[in-house]
Amino acid sequence: MLADSPLADEGEDRLGFKVYAQALAELIDHPGTHTPLMIAVSAPWGAGKTSLARLIDQRLSSWRREWGQPPHIVCWFNAWAHDDAKHLGAAFAADVAKSVDGRRKWWRRLLAPLPAAMLTPRA
């Protein structure tokens, strides 16, 4: 029996997503890849979208640690958690702002805090 829960690490990958995660991670982390970059993964419920995203995140994180580079800022956005939000785009922007703000140096957050409206999806 299989559970409908995302993978925790690539050792559990029974669907063969490692090769796709490797290719997408290389695309994302390649110096020649210009930003902004948007990648859409479209599949039915339970097909492994979150598992693929976690594998990509793990691959990117491990490379950065190996190379002694600062990690990428990854924002996990759960649209279902904001299904009652008036503007889903605002909820997304708030989650991105919180993810980025959490990586700023403490003194920068103190001297130049983000506006409160950017930190709450309801606002």
Image: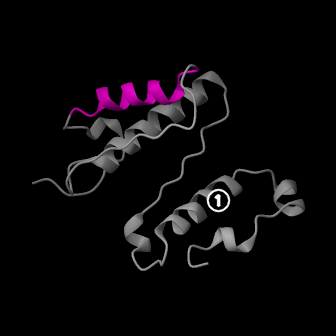
* Mark 1: few/some/many CA within 10 Å (<14, 14-19, 20+): some
Say if the magenta span includes residue 36.
Answer: no
Residue in front for this viewpoint, 24 or 107? 24
The residue segment tinted magenta is 16-31
Quick one: which residue is furthest to the left in this view?
1
The location of residue 79, given as percent across then percent down, is 40, 65
The location of residue 80, given as percent across then percent down, is 37, 69
What colour-coding does the image apply? one colour
Residue, disc 1: 97
Residue at position x 59%, y 29% from top?
A: 64
Q: Name the amino acid type tagged 1.
A: Ala
Residue 115 horizontal side relative to residue 28, left or right:
right
Residue at position x 87%, y 55% from top?
A: 107
Residue at position x 30%, y 26% from top?
A: 19
Residue in front for this viewpoint, 26 or 34? 34
Residue in front for this viewpoint, 120 or 66? 120
Magenta span: predominant SS is helix
Say if the magenta span includes residue 26.
Answer: yes
Check disc 1 and report its element: helix, strand or loop. Answer: helix
Residue 22 in which image quadrant:
top left
